[in-house]
Amino acid sequence: MKETIALYKDITKEINSEVKEGVLFPDDSIQILRADQPVFQEYCPIKDWYYDEYLIKEELYTPLDEMYMPEEFSETEWKQMKEEQAELRAQYEKDQPKLVSMKIKDVLTEMKQMMKLF
């Protein structure tokens, strides 16, 4: 349970940061990944989240040189960025069949309510 609370605090902080920066809005949908096993009665907690399908695919499948100017990065930084994009894309493709779309405000409400129960 402590791990779930810590994770929920991290996810809440991440999402709230995205909302504060104007990247996301409370009525926007995001994709969530739930744990395979319940931790409380039949409740399977949220393990991770991704932007909506359109945004995440744009971020993960658009070549980096179409999003950034390669000359602004060192060769090492550019290589690291490409590796990170490939790793994130592989993880997303693994998680994608299990993802469920939810509104941000509903995700935050659910996590807040569940943290009180844990």
Image (tube, rainbow, N blue to C red):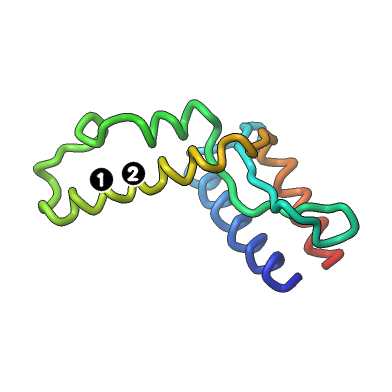
Residue type (three-letter) at the residue carrying disc 1: Lys
Q: Are marks 2 and 1 in contact (CB under 8 Å)?
A: yes
Regarding mark 1 in the picture, which secondary structure is present there?
Answer: helix
Q: What secondary structure is found at the residue carrying circle 2? A: helix
What number of labels is visible? 2
Q: Residue furthest right?
A: 41
Q: Quick one: label 2, few (<14), some, or many (20+) residues within 10 Å? A: some
Measured as percent of width and height from the top left, residue 91 is found at 47, 46
Amino acid type, residue under disc 2 in the picture:
Ala
**Residue 2 sits above or below residue 83 on the image:** below
The quadrant the N terminus occupies is bottom right
Is 17 located above or below residue 89 in the figure?
below
Q: Is 27 above or below relative to 9?
A: above
Q: Which residue is mark 1?
A: 82
Residue 7: image location, x then y, percent:
63, 63
Q: Nearer the viewer, residue 74 or 21?
A: 74
Q: Which of the image's four quarters has the C terminus?
A: bottom right
Q: Residue at x 54, y 38 (%)?
A: 24
Which residue: 40% across, 29% down? 58
Given residues 76 and 36, the one toward you in this image is: 36
- The mark found on residue 86 in the picture is 2
Residue drawn at (49%, 26%), measured in percent from left and top? 54
* Pick the front one: 85 or 28: 85
Q: Residue at x 56, y 42 (%)?
A: 95
Measured in 3D between alpha carbons, the distance from the residue under mark 2 to the one under mark 1, in whole angstroms, is 6 Å
Residue at the extreme top: 54
> Position of 41 compared to 106: left or right?
right
Closest to the observer: 91 or 100? 91
Measuring from the top left, give residue 52's x and y in whole percent: 55, 32
Q: Quadrant of residue 31?
A: top right
